[in-house]
Amino acid sequence: MKKLYYGMVGGGPGSFIGDAHRRSISIDGQAELVAGCFSRTPEKCREKGAELGLDPERCYGSFEEMAKAEAGKLDFVVVVTPNVSHYPVCKAFLQAGVNVACDKPLCLTVPEAEELVALAKEKDLLFLVTYTYTGHVTAKHVRDYIRAGKLGKIRTVMAEYPQGWLAYEGEWGGKQGEWRCDPAQSGGVNCLGDLGTHVENMVSMMTGLKIKRVLAKMDKLVPGRVLDDNDVILVEYEGGAVGSYWTSQVAIGRDNDLAVRIYGENGSIEWKQTECEKVLMVSRDGTLTERHRGNGGIEPGAAKYGRLPSGHNEGWLEAMGNLYASFAECIRAKKDGTFKPEMIDFQTVEDGAEGVKFVHACLKSNENGSVWVEL
Amino acid sequence: MKKLYYGMVGGGPGSFIGDAHRRSISIDGQAELVAGCFSRTPEKCREKGAELGLDPERCYGSFEEMAKAEAGKLDFVVVVTPNVSHYPVCKAFLQAGVNVACDKPLCLTVPEAEELVALAKEKDLLFLVTYTYTGHVTAKHVRDYIRAGKLGKIRTVMAEYPQGWLAYEGEWGGKQGEWRCDPAQSGGVNCLGDLGTHVENMVSMMTGLKIKRVLAKMDKLVPGRVLDDNDVILVEYEGGAVGSYWTSQVAIGRDNDLAVRIYGENGSIEWKQTECEKVLMVSRDGTLTERHRGNGGIEPGAAKYGRLPSGHNEGWLEAMGNLYASFAECIRAKKDGTFKPEMIDFQTVEDGAEGVKFVHACLKSNENGSVWVEL
Amino acid sequence: MKKLYYGMVGGGPGSFIGDAHRRSISIDGQAELVAGCFSRTPEKCREKGAELGLDPERCYGSFEEMAKAEAGKLDFVVVVTPNVSHYPVCKAFLQAGVNVACDKPLCLTVPEAEELVALAKEKDLLFLVTYTYTGHVTAKHVRDYIRAGKLGKIRTVMAEYPQGWLAYEGEWGGKQGEWRCDPAQSGGVNCLGDLGTHVENMVSMMTGLKIKRVLAKMDKLVPGRVLDDNDVILVEYEGGAVGSYWTSQVAIGRDNDLAVRIYGENGSIEWKQTECEKVLMVSRDGTLTERHRGNGGIEPGAAKYGRLPSGHNEGWLEAMGNLYASFAECIRAKKDGTFKPEMIDFQTVEDGAEGVKFVHACLKSNENGSVWVEL
Amino acid sequence: MKKLYYGMVGGGPGSFIGDAHRRSISIDGQAELVAGCFSRTPEKCREKGAELGLDPERCYGSFEEMAKAEAGKLDFVVVVTPNVSHYPVCKAFLQAGVNVACDKPLCLTVPEAEELVALAKEKDLLFLVTYTYTGHVTAKHVRDYIRAGKLGKIRTVMAEYPQGWLAYEGEWGGKQGEWRCDPAQSGGVNCLGDLGTHVENMVSMMTGLKIKRVLAKMDKLVPGRVLDDNDVILVEYEGGAVGSYWTSQVAIGRDNDLAVRIYGENGSIEWKQTECEKVLMVSRDGTLTERHRGNGGIEPGAAKYGRLPSGHNEGWLEAMGNLYASFAECIRAKKDGTFKPEMIDFQTVEDGAEGVKFVHACLKSNENGSVWVEL
């Protein structure tokens, strides 16, 4: 396995998201961090780069400078800046011919999203949007189980993502809470942008269903909040299935409880992030079967990502690592000339663009008093 | 404890609902069945009455006849006929001056419901609507915990009641499925009438919240179905709280999974029918505490209904029995002249009428393309 | 169904065990209480009998008197006195020709147990020992699943029954705790007699395995206790399987957690009293399958005892009621002349005697420093 | 943070245990692999080393050669050879003055263990034995919760570690199964050496209890097996507490289910490897409280090891990584001259030696028919 080299914009040492991406990439030791832009002042950036063992020459005070200087030297760049900057940073690196891995949500507006999709296509570059939870072996199993027709036609999807960290009046969950609840920094959406996009993407990945229209009720339940902190979205998919998504930041006691339940004509399947090593399937006759990652019964296209034997818990880092594993494999294949599009087993810029469209359709529905809006 | 005497309309020996009511009443041995109308032909009725040990003289071929003949002789009547007959049967016995216990839903139309409310008031009679699950000690605990202010102001309620028994195209779940899916017999609503009314009532009982308006999406997901089999209802309560209710009969693998999660400004509480001996509370600081019926920490007004020590499972029959325990206690108190309205610890005709109004508001919302409808 | 008539010794109104037996018998309305001995003074007994609606003439101040007077009039007697009196009371009624239902443990000594076995046989009477949990549909399912060979040869059994109510130094769990911890009243054994006999009997019922020898470690963990409050028993069965049983009254947080896990050469099965409506089966290839009472996949000889549809929780009373259902059916069959021994689907005096032998073998093992003792 | 350099003996690329250690070390990027001995032939070793990016000069055909050549160049060596070689390899590196991280069990005999303890002490070297599960934040929480006196005096410990992978007659679980079941390669013990040592160590770490004596029943339940595959160990600790440990490889359906339940005079605490992000505590009054890693209520000395926010699952790799985090911190402190023994927050050679003594006491007990053996 040939090592790859990557740069990072945002996510200095000690930041949750920067460390998380670096750790995920390092699990399989496939890529080495060689360049970065962690701050707007070159000195501070070099300081932080030093902590990460980077050559000071490859620590930059601006992403524009970095994109220019590193063009041709990086196999990929990881973009983990606040949401508002995703678009310009991704654009700069795409224009410089660098493959991009960007944290979700992709960007703030539909035109931005469409521009990034077009640019990636034009430049023929790989673009990973890191919807972490789609990397779980069990999440991929749900997808492949459904693809294999084991549920028959899907009828209804119930998905939810409750958290409780923003439930407290007058306390905004630290720095992260502050920017998320500030319209200027977050793009005019809080809970739905953070959690709703995960739900939309996970359901899309698992079921392959395409949303036809949405009806959104977005509420501000904590006194003083100016952006949504609790949302319910009714969904109609092409082909007749229906769904309902709930996301919340005021569900005291819920840490990070993304869960998807899918009911088809021949059975059902349930997946919970909190118990990500398991999956529950029900067959047409009502038999409830539980399967564990690493054991029999897991679809092979999912099972292959497991690193540890059954019962040896994998978690969030491995899920993120699985996204990077496929991304890195595709990059290597591109370099070798062996790449084929069906090798892509990660969420792409197209998926990210769907998320942005979903959010904007929901905002429009909600502004108009919860009416149906076509996607 | 002085024994009471009761009659029954519908629910012959061997029927689920008739046996269930009889067993629930017998748990505490408080009332004896002495009269009944189990069929439209007097011979068949006497036959069935004989199986239940009834005097043939008190087995009737019509409820009208029974109401007249038994006026003054019965402490209460139990009405467990199909939904369409609830209204005329209850009316007849109220007019005859007999206290009534009627299975939910109370009746089919709002005018019917209002008439029964008015009649019960006019005659000063007790009227129990048997929303079974509200009888659970743990459900009453949720109510009292919230009443005691332990959640603070409620912000959002997520409630659901999925079942899977009507998921099969071309199979209508036996006799019960057939009448439920037939508009003529069921009053033009299936899933929402059966399950949605349980959800609406349970949330109302637990939280004391009053619904301001609803937005309903009622779907027919099984090909060939003419009535709803999967519903999502968005709810706004007076005072600013919001909720979402999901009911389904196509959720393969779910037997009878009524569940309510309530999030307030100072914590949350969760209750599941499938684990009805437990309740989970989360305090403001995120501490998750589980309590068991029969142990410390259960609110006293709820705990007093327990019959068995902690860890000795009580279930559906005991829940129903608790409704009858309070109903019988009130009847005795009326006879003794010691009755006070605050003794009522069961769902009444007013609660039943709320359920009918809820269903009709949802039907109207759905017919108009899922718009908001005031209650 | 012809009604039966029964008497009761011990268990006046308001007592846990008396009420529980009466309620269980009343669930199916099969037998009516007509006579009793609830106290040693005739006045008090009549007072208590009156509360239960008994004829004062059939309320007795001594069980000997009652046995004589009621011979030929009762279909069965229920014996729910403290353990020390089981033997003389059962003996008196057997001698009077009355079928007996006695709470577990059967009696205190092996000779007593053997005498009751012989007497029941000689008099050709039915004798139910109410090991309540064996009545659960799911417990019977485990038995029938194993009988059907679905586990293959059983290899090991892990069973436990922890409670926490006697964990507190200086507090003896009320009246019941006091007599259980008093050698004079309990027969020289506390935890093992109460909980260990349940474990021994449940495993025996489920697996059909016969114990060859035991090695017991019986501890007194609460300072001041003179009898065992925490026991571990190693077991070897005939045929090569092995097991381990744990019972405790000092496991703070555990209410009544009887649980059995059985591992065979072709799979395993797990049962928990706290979740008595479920059972978990694992097939040879590791597929974990959960089944619910009332749904498919439950062995028919067990499923037939269910009274409520799947998802409508049955519990402790129904389990006890199932024992009485089979007991009453056998009594009726005896009266009709249609009885066959294979109709017996409850634990008998022979099973009760096994429990007494088990306890005494464990006591002997423990007294000798935890050595192997043959049964 | 100054990078450390390490070598590895055993565990070539692709092996479960080698990859696992490398990944765990790489999570925090604290140490770089620079030397190795992965095979007995220098060519093969160099080949494997190349896959891991090692300098061919630092790939060795024997551990003796490597120990000599790398003395003074490595900060530590990782020993992940089969159990039989742990002793000579560890000894060679200790003699060369290199800190050692060795997989459990430490070695095969008590004299070997004692020699390693003495040698590490004499050379003043750090010695980590990688009992992975002790690295979990929640496991450390249990330890600190108990140390803080929150359970009071411990009364009983129930610990178990069932697996099912060796349940199949004639199939020996691949290469690993073969050597484990072969007396020559495994040191005359199978299940107890692999799983029992984990149990013994985890209980010791969590409770601080010291074993006084053991009574072992070690069984061979799969036909044809020559070493134990199912063991129950009764334990008496100094100070009066008692315990029972169960380990099995024939528990079909159980992957890797290490679990510990600890009951004290003032409450209890339960920990399960399968749900390693949670811990359940019961206070004296029976309140059941669940806590999640990353949230409030986790003891600070444990919480500090968390890398991800609450609800973002950590697993096996992070647990192992936590052991290496403390090990690396101690090595750095030694180099800086700031080391103090209380900084050690990992299992050491002394703990490993306790494990070897435990196994040998159990073997002796079992050989003598399950008698008590002092430790």
Image (cartoon, coloured by chain):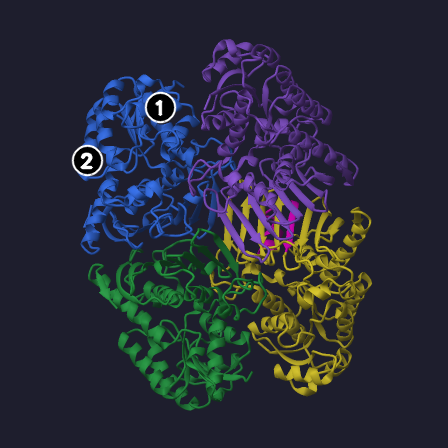
Chain colours: A green, B blue, C purple, D yellow
Measuring from the top left, give residue A254's x and y in whole percent. 42, 55
Measuring from the top left, give residue B367's x and y in whole percent. 19, 52
The image quadrant of residue A258 is bottom left
Mark 2 residue element? helix
Few, some or many residues within 10 Å of mark 2 (<14, 14–19, 20+): some
Would residue B97 be visible to someone looking at this image?
no
Measuring from the top left, give residue C141's x and y in whole percent. 54, 42
Q: Nearer the viewer, residue C115 or B118?
A: C115
Mark 1 or mark 2, earlier in chain: 1
* Left/right of residue C215 with respect to residue A365 in the rendered view: right
Mark 1 residue element? helix
Measuring from the top left, give residue C273's x and y in whole percent. 54, 41
Magenta segment includes C65:
no
Magenta residues, start to end:
D141-162
**Mark 1 → mark 2, Cα distance in angstroms:** 33 Å
**Kind of residue at badge 2:** Glu
Tell me if residue A363 comes above or below residue C318 in the rendering.
Answer: below
Q: Nearer the viewer, residue B142 or C271?
A: C271
Q: Nearer the viewer, mark 1 or mark 2?
A: 1
Q: Which residue is mark 1?
A: B47
Question: Dot 2 falls on which chain?
Answer: B
Which image quadrant: the N terminus of chain D?
bottom right
Magenta segment includes D158:
yes
Q: Which residue is mark 2?
A: B112
Question: Dot 1 falls on which chain?
Answer: B
At 58% from the left and 39% from the top, the residue drawn is C164
Tell me if residue C313 comes above or below residue B248 in the rendering.
Answer: above
Marks 1 & 2 on one chain: yes
